[in-house]
Image: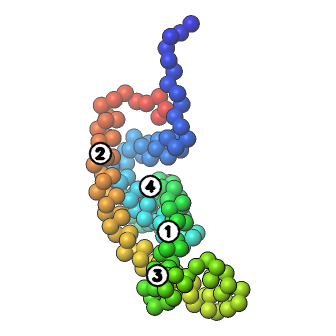
Amino acid sequence: MSTESVAPAPGFFRRRVVEPVLGQLRQGLAPEQLALTVALAASCGLVPVLGLTTLLGTAVAMWLRLNVATMLLVSHLMSPVQILILLPLMRFGAGLLGGPSAAQLTLARLKYLFTNDLAGAFQLFWRAELGALLLWLAGSVPVVLGLYWVLRPAFRRIVRRQAASPPSPFA
């Protein structure tokens, strides 16, 4: 009988998220590039237009010559947060552009407008969505800068640690 203990297999999050991102560092992606990719992906993942995440993330990654797979992985991980902030951004966005107050923009009101006043619904939705996009653009700048500022040194430390330690059995 062997007394050696076998390390448990890493969990789902580690296998499907952490290891692929760290794999980019192992494959030679600079920590600065990976930090920029993750920061921009987080911002792209929060765009207040459902269905735009993949197109926006791919376009940004190709334009800046960043890793598309990492960009899409991180941006799609932001989907729960995107859904949580969608209605508040639309409420404030509608108010920003002279629409109804935040209290008036509810799911019940949108449902009522779409069934009884389609033109009014589209006008309200258009104004709310445009305002939400403006708020998202204004909020994206500090989010990207803050994440980049935090992640760049973190990824540098990981690269130094990987260079000093033996390779992981899960790599």
Q: Which mark is residue 93?
A: 3
Residue 105 to residue 84: above or below? below
Instruction: Tell me which residue sits at (32%, 58%) in the image.
Output: 148
Q: Secondary structure at mark 2?
A: helix
Q: Amino acid at mark 4?
A: Asn
Tell which circle, 2 or 1, labels the residue nearer the N-terminal end: 1
Q: Is residue 56 left or right of residue 37?
A: right
Question: What's the amino acid at mark 3?
Answer: Gly
The percent position of residue 23, horizontal first and vertical second, equals 44, 42
Q: How busy is the neighbourhood of tag 3: few (under 14 within 10 Å), some, or many (20 plus)?
A: many
* N-terminal label among 3 and 1: 1
N-terminal label among 4 and 3 = 4
Spatial CA distance of label 2 from label 4 is: 18 Å
**Distance CA(mark 3)–CA(mark 2):** 38 Å
Q: Within 10 angstroms of label 1, few (less than 14), some, or many (20 or more) residues?
A: some
Q: Determine the image quadrant of residue 112.
A: bottom right
Question: Could you tell me if residue 68 is visible in this image?
Answer: no
Query: Is residue 135 rendered to the left or right of residue 5?
Result: left
Q: What residue is shown with label 4?
A: 67
Q: Which residue lies under the disc numbered 2?
A: 156
Whole-angstrom CA distance, mark 2 to mark 1, is 31 Å
Tag nearer the camera, 2 or 1: 1
Q: In the rendering, which numbered label is found on residue 85?
A: 1
Which secondary structure lies at badge 4?
loop
Asked whether the residues under the numbered discs 1 and 4 touch, taking CB atoms below 8 Å apart as contact, a structural biologist would say no
Judged from the image, the secondary structure of the residue bearing numbered disc 1 is helix
